[in-house]
Image (cartoon, rainbow, N blue to C red):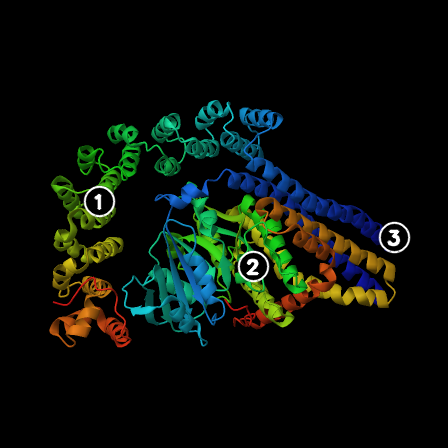
């Protein structure tokens, strides 16, 4: 009896695995086309013209910083050095309890100034505003702690330009990041309301970005290399395809360009969710599709920067459980869109895809974790079959990961050959070395979602080499 | 069931494992090939066979999105290599109803950059088949400069063409002044805004009069550009005309007025001081903010602390402005003295 039951559970898990992997395979095919299109687009792009033109749309870059003492200077340096005709950098210190503000004051010789702005969004109290005599396009807003969404809204109140780019304070950007991100927008600003782009990951982004593309190395520590692979799969196998199919549902917090009037219209970043990025993307889709408006949100394959990845398992679990929680919160909140033809591809494919592959995944993973070893122990399956099943899953993972590596390399040619080879070697071992950590984090995140926990649980920053 | 599961697992491995191996080899070998091709491309030489292949690709109408981008990429490569067929293909691509192909031709024409390319770009600006902002960006980027070719655009019946004509004349202060002044009376507000923006880079009585007249335009974005231009064209004499825009009903005009007054420096102080008692609190705030930004508040705080004027500025700017000024002066830091207390 127990054996039969276990057999059924295992079959259900395998069915789920088959379904999701078939979906991933389909997405990879679509992503390959999108990557090819964007690659040709990049080749024929004249960034030097865009960079020098006064017709390139100005952008306000907003950095929300909370306890980012170790990272903030290199992030702001990279943003001030962006190759773009007109942009401003607004750093919002969200009531940090460490030396973030002091670090900014020292690095950029900040002086306090009063400015009078429209308060489009209600935020926690702004304590002071600083400007830098050496960098006229830098504004630092010091405010009481209210969370990342609140900080971004405070930045929006100060922003002067028609497009805004929300970025994370732990990310170091490529000099051409904004040009790459805005290249589609300048062609059709009436329709393209949101853009995100691919980011790499490293333990110390400043060091990683100090090397020019083509000779850049990957952080080869397995935990960071696997996160790099995770990002590659997320961007190249999934988001590129979503972008092509019209349901790009996650404009990532580390680099999200939005048309400012859209943000004002939908009420800015929401404070009621654990995290702001994915929810905002869902909200914009929901609003525009409900009203039958013509719009596009894109994900680009261009590498625009490197963000900091947790360098210990504990930090990684803390980060990923938060991601799982916010996905569950958002997908559940927008359940009205599931399978609803009114929301076109977002309702019919995007939201259900999230539901099946992200929200429900921990339940199936838990079932598989319990039932598979138990099946072997009780003799429902032989150990050989168990090992073959694991090998099959690992092979599929490896093939999908290799696709992502290939798409990235075709697009950017950023990394050295030996680093690419290292990633390819790591790919089949993902199931054993990395996936268990993510499964644990997702289970934890799902549990916290069910308990209604909305705390941020920010991971402690890595130790970086001195500048 | 065991048998079935075993077969499925083996079948999956039989497909996925070789796929991984093939993809891995493609990554590593493809990268090596890319490095080699790149070295060849850097040498600027396009092999005859490769060139023929690219010409065929550009000539054939694309059936898919992918094909369209391959065509665009081929066009770009032929232009960069200065292939003899490039000009013919560029002319044809520019007339292509597909906007993306036309846009690619624009980019490529920008790279060609001679008189022939300018002619084609100016006609494309008239046709409006491709994004005009892209054409404008290329035209501004060109050497030799296409200034004289732009003048006929100011008389075009299409307001969008007049707008771009007026905008693109910005870097040519010697050209089209009378026509630009006439365009400040254009029925299309976008054209008026573009004309006044371009006049902002010039000087003279007629230009000044036309600029100041648009400070009262019914459309907010025309007033915005007029405010920005007035400071450049008229200088400090425009301060008394620009300062009332600090109470404009549109936030963006108020912001532009602040920028213009900041740019005037100390000469704007009398006009700003007069706004400190304006009934609109935003206008008072704005005036106090500009006085702070041009260094007048710091200078006054150091030289005449407690003076009635300083107190009036603090009253207009609120506690935040006072505290910020006190912190700056206490730290002994002053901005370069663009303004001095009287």
Q: Nearer the viewer, residue B227 or B1?
A: B227
Residue B244 can be seen in this image: yes
Which residue position holds label 1?
B200
In the picture provided, is B42 more to the left or to the right than A53?
right
Q: Position of residue A296 (x, y in %)?
A: 47, 46
* Mark 1 vs mark 2, CA separation in Å: 44 Å
Q: Position of residue B199 (x, y in %)?
A: 21, 41
Furthest toward the front, the residue is B43
- The crowding category of the residue bearing disc 3, from other C-alpha atoms within 10 Å (few below 14, some 14 to 19, many at least 20), is few
**Residue under disc 3 on the same chain as residue under disc 1:** yes
Q: Position of residue A233 (x, y in %)?
A: 63, 53
Cβ atoms at labels 1 and 2 below 8 Å apart = no
* Mark 3 vs mark 2, CA separation in Å: 50 Å
Q: Nearer the viewer, mark 3 or mark 2?
A: 2
Q: Does residue A395 lie above or below A456 as drawn?
A: above
**Residue under disc 1 on the same chain as residue under disc 2:** no
Residue A381 can be seen in this image: no
Which residue position holds label 3?
B3
Q: Nearer the viewer, residue A324 or A87?
A: A87
In the picture provided, is B143 more to the left or to the right than B239?
right
Q: Position of residue B121 (x, y in %)?
A: 38, 30
Q: What element does badge 1 sit on?
A: loop
Chain for mark 2? A
- State the image quarter where residue A358 is shown: bottom right
Which numbered disc flags the more N-terminal residue, 3 or 1? Answer: 3
* Mark 3 vs mark 1, CA separation in Å: 82 Å
Which residue position holds label 2?
A208
Residue A94 disc label: none
């Amino acid at each position: 009896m127990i054996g039969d039951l276990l057999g059924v559970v295992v079959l259900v898990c395998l069915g789920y695995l088959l379904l999701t992997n078939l979906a991933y395979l389909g997405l990879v095919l679509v992503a390959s086309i999108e990557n090819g299109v964007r690659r040709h687009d990049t080749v024929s792009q004249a960034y030097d013209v865009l960079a020098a033109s006064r017709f390139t749309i100005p952008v306000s870059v907003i950095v929300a910083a909370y306890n980012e003492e170790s990272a903030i200077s290199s992030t702001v340096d990279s943003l001030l050095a962006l190759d773009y005709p007109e942009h401003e950098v607004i750093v919002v210190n969200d009531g940090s309890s460490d030396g973030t503000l002091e670090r900014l004051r020292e690095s950029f010789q900040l002086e306090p100034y009063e400015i009078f702005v429209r308060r489009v969004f209600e935020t926690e109290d702004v304590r002071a505003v600083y400007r830098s005599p050496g960098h006229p396009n830098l504004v630092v807003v010091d405010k009481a702690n209210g969370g990342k969404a609140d900080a971004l809204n405070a930045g929006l109140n100060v922003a002067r330009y028609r497009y805004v780019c929300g970025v994370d304070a732990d990310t170091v950007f490529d000099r051409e990041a904004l040009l790459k991100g805005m290249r589609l927008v300048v062609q059709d600003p009436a329709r393209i309301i949101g853009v995100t782009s691919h980011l790499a990951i490293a333990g110390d982004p400043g060091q990683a970005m100090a090397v020019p593309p083509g000779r850049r190395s990957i952080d080869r520590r397995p935990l960071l290399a696997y996160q790099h692979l995770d990002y590659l799969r997320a961007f190249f196998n999934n988001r590129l395809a979503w972008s092509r199919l019209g349901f790009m549902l996650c404009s990532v917090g580390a680099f999200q360009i939005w048309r400012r009037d859209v943000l004002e219209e939908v009420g800015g970043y929401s404070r009621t969710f654990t995290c702001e990025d994915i929810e905002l993307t869902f909200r914009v889709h929901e609003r525009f599709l409900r009203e039958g408006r013509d719009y596009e949100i894109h994900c680009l394959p261009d590498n625009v920067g490197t963000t900091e990845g947790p360098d210990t398992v504990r930090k990684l679990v803390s980060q990923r459980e938060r991601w799982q929680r916010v996905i569950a919160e958002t997908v559940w909140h927008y359940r009205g869109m599931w399978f609803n033809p009114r929301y076109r591809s977002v309702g019919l494919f995007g939201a259900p895809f999230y539901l099946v592959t992200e929200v429900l995944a921990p339940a199936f993973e838990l079932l598989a974790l319990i039932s598979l070893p138990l099946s072997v122990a009780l003799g429902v399956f032989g150990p050989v079959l168990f090992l073959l099943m694991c090998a099959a899953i690992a092979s599929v993972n490896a093939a999908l990961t290799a696709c992502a590596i290939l798409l990235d390399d075709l697009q950017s040619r950023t990394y050295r050959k030996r680093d690419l080879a290292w990633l390819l070697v790591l790919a089949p071992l993902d199931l054993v070395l990395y996936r268990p950590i993510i499964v644990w984090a997702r289970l934890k995140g799902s549990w916290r979602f069910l308990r209604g926990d909305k705390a941020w649980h920010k991971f402690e920053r890595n130790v970086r080499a001195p500048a | 069931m065991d048998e079935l599961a075993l077969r499925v697992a083996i079948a999956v491995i039989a497909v996925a494992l070789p796929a991984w191996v093939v993809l891995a080899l493609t990554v590593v070998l493809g990268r090596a090939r890319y490095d080699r091709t790149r070295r060849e491309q850097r040498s600027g030489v396009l092999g005859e066979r490769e060139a023929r292949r690219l010409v065929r690709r550009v000539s054939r109408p694309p059936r898919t999105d992918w094909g369209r981008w391959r065509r665009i990429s081929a066009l770009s490569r032929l232009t960069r290599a200065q292939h003899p067929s490039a000009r013919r293909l560029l002319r044809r691509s520019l007339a292509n109803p597909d906007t993306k192909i036309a846009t690619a031709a624009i980019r490529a024409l920008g790279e060609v950059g001679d008189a022939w390319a300018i002619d084609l770009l100016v006609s494309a600006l008239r046709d409006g088949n491709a994004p005009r902002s892209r054409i404008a960006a290329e035209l501004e980027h060109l050497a030799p400069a296409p200034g004289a070719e732009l003048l006929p655009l100011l008389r075009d019946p299409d307001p969008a063409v007049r707008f771009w004509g007026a905008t693109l004349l910005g870097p040519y202060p010697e050209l089209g002044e009378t026509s630009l002044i006439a365009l400040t009376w254009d029925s299309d507000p976008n054209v008026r805004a573009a004309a006044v923006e371009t006049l902002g880079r010039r000087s003279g009585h007629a230009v000044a009069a036309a600029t100041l007249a648009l400070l009262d335009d019914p459309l907010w974005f025309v007033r915005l550009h007029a405010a920005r231009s007035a400071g450049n064209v008229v200088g400090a004499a425009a301060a008394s005309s620009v300062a009332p825009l600090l109470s404009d009903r549109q936030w963006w005009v108020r912001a532009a007025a602040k920028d213009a007054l900041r740019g005037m420096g100390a000469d704007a102080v009398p006009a700003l001081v007069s706004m400190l008692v304006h009934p609109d609190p935003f206008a008072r705030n704005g005036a106090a903010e500009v006085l702070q930004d041009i260094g007048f508040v710091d200078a006054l705080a150091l030289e005449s602390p407690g003076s009635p004027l300083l107190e009036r500025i603090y009253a207009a700017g609120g506690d935040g402005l006072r505290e910020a000024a006190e912190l700056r002066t206490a730290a002994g830091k002053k901005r370069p003295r663009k303004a001095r207390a009287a």
